[in-house]
Amino acid sequence: MKIVMQIIYSIGIILFILLFNFNNVYAQQIVDDKKWISGQTTSYYNAGGYSGSLSSYIYSGSYTPSDTIWISGQTTSYYNASGYSGSLSSYVYSGSYTPSESKNANYTCYNTLVYVYNSEGKRLASPDYQNQLCPSSESYNDAQGYSGTLYRISASPNRYCAKTGFPNASCSENWTAKYSGIVTKPGNDTRVYRYEGFVTKPTSDTRVYRYQGWVYAVVNNPTNSGQASSTGNGKASGQFIWQLNKQNANAPSRVQLRNTAGIAGSHFATRNSIYQINSPSVISKTSTAPQNYYVNDPHDLRDKNINYAFAYDYTNYYRDVYTCSSSRSDGCIQWTYSHREPDWTYQETATFNKTMKGDHKYQDQQEIVYPTNNISLIVGRTTNLSNMNESYQQEHFNVDNSTITKETQTWIEINEPVTYRSDLGNPLYSLTDELWYFPNEIDENLEEQYKNTTSFTYSDIAIPLRVNMKNNSSINYKTEDNFFVTKNNGLLFSLPHTQVSILAINKKAKEEYEDFTGETYEDEVLNSPFNGSRYYFNINGNSEQEPNIQYSNDYIVGELGLSDATLHIGENLEFEKYLLGNPIDDPVINEQPGSKVLNANYDNSITIKSNQISDLKDISNDRNFLIHGFRSTDIYKKYNQVKNILPSLSY
């Protein structure tokens, strides 16, 4: 099994090498007309149209090169045997040699000299004086074999005896003598000598030479053409694209034009790729690489034709090119493969053209009026070059503009949502150019403040809006101002939504009330600044709004999305009953007097004199403005004035 695996592995390696070198096969080819000759006696051949230089070879005989060997153990200094000879050098064959050695040796001698004094006290030498002295030299021998003579180099006593002393007494001197010298150990030589070295046998050459080699004839240039395998017609990949695009979230949209074409055909070689984008009087671009351009004002391409083109030259044929690698005076005798190159004599051109419409609706006002609750706008077109199929991309806006029905004339919350989705995957963009809410009516005291001065004609009233919340797929709007209503008199007033101070709100209520009515403010505000994005119905008795009739409730929001679109969101608003009014109108709250009831009996009565009637008329003619057309703001003041004229009312 192991042998089989080795064989399979070896075959795999061979196949890999063959495949790896497939494209280099031609580089190994040589084209020539040659033949081999030998046995020639000259180094150049020229016969039968073939010629060429030849190389020598051994025809007969032999050659023995010189040889050198090493020999040793010879008893003479010159060797000559078996064809080898040479001078040798001596060497110690056996035995040894120990040379003599010397060293410095020392010795010390100690002795005592004794003197005597005669009867007269004069010092005399001892009779054994000569025997007491250390000698002038000493013989030396030691255990290591060293021997020799040491000589006295110094002598000194520990003291000197005086020349006179006590009669018949004696005196001793202790002497120390130092000895030094060279001592020697003899050498030993038992050596036996022999001879060694390199000896050489000289060269022997009996060779006879002849000449051989390839000879060549002149050959024509083998360069040729062929069709490459697995090639075909021109094909392209990539896309022709136009899209609305933003440089950044706060910038107006522009049009991005892209030509991302690429060569998808199978060819031996291609060249001269040309990319084009053209729209008359707007843009005209030609390049040799994929294109990406911007038209800053989308209006320039509105409903214009945008022309795209991609073209390239190709050939499915090649030429195997040979170069002359060896020549002589009458022509080339050897051609070597140089390279494979495209054969452009078979050139073809592949062309791809497409015209797409710039049918966006940039900066148009878009109507989303009930019952329609969505709109889709084209923001791009794409042509796939693989099949030349064209598709379009849209952005989609959805709103909630269903009809609002209230039981009576209270209020509605202003929190208008818009949801968004783009086929291009971009987030929702908002430039907040136009943000308005157009109610049908508003309270009289606010009519001037919110008078419609815009270019839109949906209502005489225009209330500014603001973006309350925004993310990538939705946005919602609230009123720029918060609206407040007082509890007793129902006075409606507004403040910027950024003003959340209760003191400031109450101060504004007081100022508005007293400025509008001329009366002292004695009321309170019902709602808070955190729920002030509201529209309050106009409950004025002179209002044109009637129950169960749908009135338009319009919003303008923009600019949104890639189209920088302004959306007109139209919805309907209605109420079922008046909030306040005469009983005949069936209001929720009856706050208006009815007609006089004739022939009725009353338990109480009062008599009014003519001069009192005149005073009462003066009081009546001096009444203040009625809030909502029917609600008095001076009722307590007038009541007290009437009591002054008719005191009996107090009882």
Image: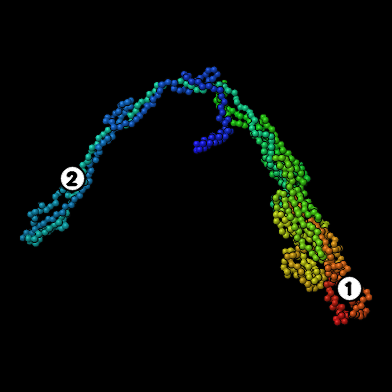
CA neighbours of label 1 inside 10 A, class few (<14), some (14 to 19), many (20+): few
- Residue lying farthest right? 599
Q: Which residue is mark 1?
A: 621
User: In the picture shown, does residue 91 fall above or below 588?
Assistant: above
- Is label 2 in a helix, a strand or a loop? strand
The CA distance from mark 1 to mark 2 is 171 Å
Q: Which amino acid is tagged 1?
A: Asn
Q: Which amino acid is tagged 2?
A: Gly
- Is label 1 in a helix, a strand or a loop? helix
Asked whether 279 or 470 is in front, the reply is 470
Coordinates of residue 509 in the picture (x, y in percent): 77, 69
Residue 593 can be seen in this image: yes
**Which image quarter is the C terminus in?**
bottom right
- Residue lying farthest front? 1
The dot on residue 148 is: 2
- Residue lying farthest top? 48
Seen in the image, is 437 located left or right of residue 24?
A: right
User: In the picture shown, does residue 356 fall above or below 437?
Assistant: above
User: In the picture shown, does residue 649 fall above or below 136?
Assistant: below
Asked whether 252 or 458 is in front, the reply is 458
User: N-terminal of the two: label 1 or label 2?
Assistant: 2
Coordinates of residue 139 in the picture (x, y in percent): 16, 47
